[in-house]
Image (cartoon, grey):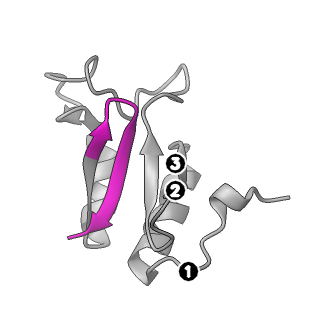
Amino acid sequence: MRSHLQDTQGMTRPAKFAFKALIEMGVPVLRHPSQPEHFVISAEDNPDHVMWADYYGAMGLDTHDFGVHKSITEVLTRHDLFAEWENPGMLNVWDA
């Protein structure tokens, strides 16, 4: 059973494709709490094997840009989206 937090109904088409691609990669994504056409990436739920987003810990790493794993940025760019830090625990994903 899918979580309502992983439901893509109401998302823009690019957001749906990116959301699904990031889920397949194991990125902790959730519906945006107040913008149903977009989603967020949690920086508080990094699995042990990959640091997907970390406001403080990933800064300066070759694998990250501004604390966001480069593979996330590649997926978002491919779908004309970008991520922006809401706070140290959450990235908003918006249309570029």
Range shown magenta: 85-96
State the residue at coordinates (36%, 33%): 53
> Which three-letter amino acid code belongs to the residue tagged 2?
Pro
Q: Could you say where residue 69 lies in the image, as x and y percent from the top left? A: 30, 38
Q: What secondary structure is found at the residue carrying circle 2?
A: loop
Q: Circle 3 is placed at which residue position? A: 25
Find out whether the residues at labels 1 and 2 contact each other: C-beta distance under 8 Å: no
Query: Tag 3: Cα neighbours inside 10 Å, few (<14), some, or many (≥20)?
Result: few
How far apart are labels 3 and 1 at the CA level? Answer: 22 Å
Give the side of residue 91 with respect to residue 40, left or right: left
Q: Looking at the picture, how far across and down is residue 76, in whole percent?
A: 31, 61
Residue 7 vs 31, above or below: the answer is below
Question: Which of the two labelled residues, at mark 3 and mark 2, occupies the earlier sequence position?
Answer: 3
What amino acid type is highlighted by mark number 3?
Met
Q: Quadrant of the N terminus?
A: bottom right
Residue 17 percent coordinates (x, y): 47, 72
The circle on residue 89 is none
Pointer 2 residue = 33
Magenta residues: mostly which secondary structure?
strand
On the image, numbered disc 1 is attached to which residue? 10
Q: Nearer the viewer, mark 3 or mark 1?
A: 1
Screen quadrant of the C terminus: bottom left
